Structure formats: C-alpha cells, structure tokens
C-alpha cells in the first residue's frame, strides 16, 4: 500500500476532528479511489499497537467505514449529504447492492469478494438511513431488505439469521422468545413500558393514539389522525383556517352581519353560507 493512501486517510481524520467534514469526505474519497485504481484491494493495515477487534483489518474497508460514517454522524451529515457532497454520494451509491462499475472487477479472490460484499452491505444500509431521514420510508425499507438479503449469502454476515435465539445447550434446536421492553412517551405525558417490536413514531393529533398507519389531514396533509372521527373532533384545528376565509368572503355580503353572528355562535355556518352564496 502506497504512502499516499495513508496520507489521504490521515488528512481526512485531522479534518474530521477539526470539524471540516466536507474536506474529510474529499480525502477519504481520494484514498478509496486510489486503492480501487492502483492498489491491492485486500491489503492489510500495518500492525501498529492495539487495534479494536471490531475494526476492519484491511485498508479499504477501514477507510470505507470512516467515509460512510460521515453520512450518519449527526454533526457531519449537515455538510456531507447528497446535495452538498454529490461526488461523495455518487461514490457511496456506486457500491449499493444492484449497481455495477468496472472497479468491482478488482475484487477477484474469495477474500476480496467477501470484502466487496461487506462494502456493499454498508453502502446500502447507509443509503437506507439517508433516505429514511428524508422520510422516504418505502425506499429505505427496500435498501435495508437488499442489504439483509446480501448478508444472508455469507454465513459470517448472517449472524442474526435463523440461528438467532437458539438455546446453546438444548438437546434440539429451539427458539426462545425474548421480549424487548422499551419506554413509550404518550401524548398526555405518561410513560408506558411496552414489550413489542412495533415502534410508531407518529401519534394522532386528537387522541394521542400511536400507529404506523395514520392518515393525514385532508386539508393541510401534515397533521396525523387515526381516523375521520378524530379529525372532525379536532374542530379547533380544522375550524380556524376555514373560518378565517369565510369571514373574509362574508365581509362583502349584504347579509354579513347576521351570518357573522352565526359564525361567532359556532352554528352550522357552512350550510348557511352556502345557501346565501350560491
């Protein structure tokens, strides 16, 4: 591995810790492209003291992990994203599951192919996170599924597959259901301990019920409701914008005094207004 690659990585790390995230991304890209073009993709990192056991031992996956982390870091992602760093996102998308590029042919040996799968899985998961933050949950779920399906093709990556939950000392393989409790904050401020795996981030604006399939207000298309009854019951929210428009229109009507009085009494203004304005 040439010294130039390590120089790019060092510059990228210094830039990251200095808060220069875009510069850090650019140097990681240079290192990755240099390896893909001129270096051996499976080259190991030279031994230098204690290396964390969960860090990649190869230069390219190590650099790739640091590069893709920029798209997930809560501080860096403000500067390193598809809009502000199109070249970085292009490189990330280059290794998404399903995409092809001539550089993929550099992974020839069996070990290199395993590294390539790992790089693809990381790239696809990170892209899923990026689109999830854009509230494109359908695409995010698709990317996660692509990454999981690829991981299932290699035993080491499939560590949470069918073997998950198997009792280690049981006579016959079996699965144990282990509930995973978590704390849920309700709309009224109370805390509830729930033991299921369905996490709903939205709650009804009227009753506070949480669900993964809430409908949006038919007027603003933003406020979530669990049904039409709750939307109608949340009269204050729906009524105020509509009443403002009605008041403006009725101010020019010959019967405006009587109609506005009805509006203030909260009567069925829509029926009254319609009969006079037709």
Image (cartoon, rainbow, N blue to C red):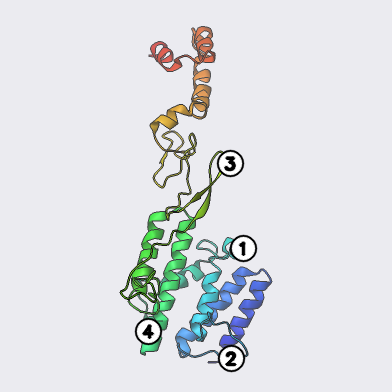
Label 2 Cα crowd, 10 Å radius (few <14 / some 14-19 / many 20+): few
Q: Quadrant of the C terminus?
A: top left
Of the numbered discs 2 and 4, the one sitting upstream in the chain is: 2
Q: Are marks 1 and 2 in contact (CB under 8 Å)?
A: no
Q: Tell me where residue 257 appears, x and y as whole percent.
A: 53, 8
Q: Nearer the viewer, residue 196 or 98?
A: 196
Q: Residue 122 sits in which quadrant? A: bottom left
Foreground disc of the pair 2, 4: 4
CA separation in Å, label 2 and label 4: 25 Å
* SS label for mark 2: helix
Q: Which residue is mark 3?
A: 189
CA separation in Å, label 3 and label 1: 29 Å
Q: Which residue is mark 2?
A: 3
Q: Which residue is mark 4?
A: 113
Image vertical order of residue 194 relative to residue 70, above or below: above
Image vertical order of residue 112 relative to residue 82, above or below: below
* SS label for mark 3: loop
């Amino acid at each position: 591995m040439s010294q130039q690659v390590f120089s790019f990585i060092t510059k990228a790390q210094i830039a990251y810790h200095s808060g220069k995230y875009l510069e850090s991304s650019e140097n990681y890209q240079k290192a990755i492209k240099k390896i893909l073009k001129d270096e051996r993709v499976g080259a190991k990192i030279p031994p230098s003291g204690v290396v964390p056991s969960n860090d990649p031992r190869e230069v390219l996956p190590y650099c790739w992990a640091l590069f893709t982390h920029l798209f997930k870091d809560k501080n860096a992602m403000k500067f390193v994203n598809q809009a502000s760093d199109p070249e970085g996102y292009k490189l990330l998308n280059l290794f998404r599951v399903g995409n092809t590029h001539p550089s993929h042919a550099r992974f020839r040996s069996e070990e290199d192919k395993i590294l390539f799968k790992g790089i693809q899985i990381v790239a696809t998961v990170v892209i899923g996170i990026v689109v999830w933050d854009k509230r494109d949950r359908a695409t995010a779920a698709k990317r996660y599924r692509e990454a999981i399906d690829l991981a299932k093709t290699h035993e080491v990556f499939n560590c949470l597959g069918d073997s998950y939950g198997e009792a280690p000392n049981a006579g016959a393989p079996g699965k144990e259901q282990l509930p995973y409790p978590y704390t849920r904050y309700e709309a009224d401020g109370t805390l509830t301990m729930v033991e299921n795996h369905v996490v709903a981030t939205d709650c009804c604006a009227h009753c506070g019920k949480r669900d993964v399939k809430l409908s949006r207000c038919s007027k603003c298309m933003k406020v979530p409701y669990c049904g039409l009854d709750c939307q109608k019951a949340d009269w204050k929210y729906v009524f105020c914008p509509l009443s403002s428009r009605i008041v403006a229109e009725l101010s020019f009507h010959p019967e405006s005094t009587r109609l506005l009085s009805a509006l203030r009494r909260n009567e069925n203004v829509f029926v009254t207004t319609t009969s006079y304005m037709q």
